[in-house]
Amino acid sequence: MNISSFKWLFVLYFSLIGVSGTAQKVGLLLGSYVSSRWYLDQKLFVDRLSGLGITCAVKIAYDPDEQLEQAGELIEAGAEVLVIVPLDAGKAASIVRIAKYAGVPVISYDRLILSNELAVYLSYDNLKVGKLQAQYMLSKVPRGDYLLINGPISDNNAILFREGQMQVLRPHIESGDIRIVDDIVLDKWSQMESFEKVTLHYKSDRKKPDVILAANDALANGVIKALPSEYTGKVYISGQDADLAGIRNIIAGHQTMTVYKPIKPLAYLAAEKAEELLNRQELTAGMVRHSDSISVPTILMEPVVVDKNNYRETILKDGHASLLEVVNNLGEAFEQERNKIRLTLLEKEKALEVEKKINQRNTFIIILIFFLLSVMGLSYTIYQKQRDNKLLNKQKKIIQGKNEELNQTNKTLRAYNDELTQHQEEISAQRDAIALQNQKLEEVKTIIEQQRDEIMRQNETLEAEVRKRTGELVQYVQQLEEYAFITAHKLRAPVARITGLGQLIEKKQSNPEEVKFILEKLSAASEELGLIFDDLNAVLDIRTFSMEVFTEVDIMEEIDYVKANLKAEIKRHNVIIKPELSYVKTIFSIQPYIQSILFNLISNSIKYRHADRQLEVKVRTELVDDKVCLSVSDNGIGIAAPDIESMFQLYQRHHFHVEGRGIGLFLVKTQMDALGGEIKVKSRVGKGTTLEFYLKQTADTSTIKEAKKTITI
């Protein structure tokens, strides 16, 4: 990135400041409308915010990456609070992390995002949902065959549903009263996928269930449509969400029960909590531990069992069903639009397939034309030979006629006999030539087949390479987006100080001492900004495909270089540096990168040494599974296990008793990525740290052979 790119970042930053006053205050991120209930959640949430005088922007995503991109758009547009129904509980943690950098709190709605940085998690007791489903079915069928069908494990709610079900069913399974005939886990909350899986089960020779525990009403509706007519209404089917299709199926007797989670209280509570966050109020929610690593403020509501006997007193009385009717047509319109998009994608795929077939056909035509030309050439040669044979036959007749005339002259007859023998030899030579041409034709045919196989192999290799390069490009774009967020956040402080100090100079012109003091502070802020630009340039020199040349790097020379540059620190702190390079002494790599990596690691070891013992740093090389492992170990203060994962992030620091900017290890990680290497960290607090760098075996061949001999001995 050059200076003009930084100017663009400044323009973007100040343009965002300029529009923040008119941007949406709250951003709502939903997954695709797989159930009609999500239309109702959106409507109630937005209506409640509108009643509180707050605007809301709504985004609908169909995959986790799209949801991450939409979150970035909302933050850039000035959203001050995000409310998220995550498509993937783990991947959505990236949204929370990015939002935190931008100072935007996140509410996890209905489904838990696996992050400790949430403002609050609002939902119903989903563990109890699974228990209620299983308890209801046991009351109807205490002994029998059960089929379980659940949503994707990327949704934490699906995991809780199954855990609640199994807590109730497990004793009955162990006693033999309940038998699980199938346990289906879907990739999405998809009615169509549910239909396909259950259809396959009933077409197989597997045992048919008495009870189907469907995790929600959308899956239950797919199950009902898949049931053969002789099983409709005879299989007990559970559900959840009390959506419109589920209610209708219960009234019709096709679905046995559903678990009702009133949407209005949950949507209104989310809107009110968003308002509190906008007003910077402290939220009233108790901390709940959801796993060994996740503990967040949580509010859970109680779900209700609904069947044919009580749907009037619950769902109809609350007005839930009538509201679903209102938004149902809108939901169908969204689904139709999504189906159009899917059809368009399918048409594109078919067009690509047709193009591929056309290419294959053209290749075949070229090969066929070449083959036909070869056959035509052979045919022409045979024709020429046949014509020669006809001429020869005519000459034979002439000879025979002359023989009759020259019977009296034996000498003339012998001359004609010699001529006939010569013609026979020519025919034999021509026959040999034809045989040779046939052999060459077979060789050409073999070459054509080999070329066709090579073309097919190259096509497959090219497709794999395109997919690989596309994945790398997507990952690189994602890294640049996250990098832009961090950079904008880091640049805010010095830019704000420079702006503020400039305004103070205008006000303090009459007081030279104060102006001098302000100018000193202004110079310090400019130097800080300059350091940030230096950091960015150092990173971008690596990330923009540096053209550094790979050469043979002598590791001992680089260690000596680092020791010379750190001579004063090594002497002042009595540091011992021990090189152990018996296996690999040189590697084929980028010399400035290896030098920078060793310098950053050894200087970090000195900086974070243990106060109670003499610092000892070991630099070791070895061969591990056809890779060169370069490791740097110290006996310093060590790094806590939770901090290891984030220690290579830009401007990330975990020890603040010494000066530092959090750029060194980030540069090390960036350089190793450029070299295609892998980093492993081993550390114990108070004991020391070891960083291992694994590079492809690119050392000099003689060095590697010698190393292998040493290992064998």
Image (spheres, rainbow, N blue to C red):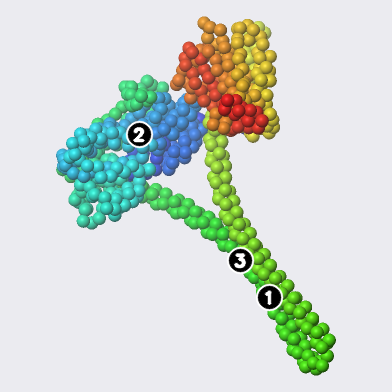
Placement of 366 over or under 306, stated as above or below: below
State which quarter of the image contains the C terminus.
Answer: top right
Where residue 447 sits, quadrant-wise, is bottom right
The Cα atoms of the two marked residues, 1 and 3, are separated by 21 Å
**Few, some or many C-alpha atoms within 10 Å of disc 2 (few <14, some 14-19, many ≥20)?**
many
**Few, some or many C-alpha atoms within 10 Å of disc 1 (few <14, some 14-19, many ≥20)?**
few
Would you say 221 lies left or right of 445 here?
left
Where residue 374 sits, quadrant-wise, is bottom right
Question: Mark 2 = which residue?
Answer: 156
Tell me the residue at 25%/36% (across/down). Answer: 165
Q: Position of residue 562 (x, y in %)?
A: 66, 17
Mark nearer the N terminus (1 vs 3): 3
Residue type at tag 3: Leu
Question: Mark 3 = which residue?
Answer: 368
Mark nearer the N terminus (2 vs 1): 2
Would you say 170 lies left or right of 354 here?
left
Q: In front: 88, or 411? A: 411
- Badge 3 marks a residue whose secondary structure is helix
Residue type at tag 2: Asn
Q: Position of residue 239 (x, y in %)?
A: 26, 42
- Badge 1 marks a residue whose secondary structure is helix
Placement of 333 over or under 479, stated as above or below: below
Question: Mark 1 = which residue?
Answer: 382
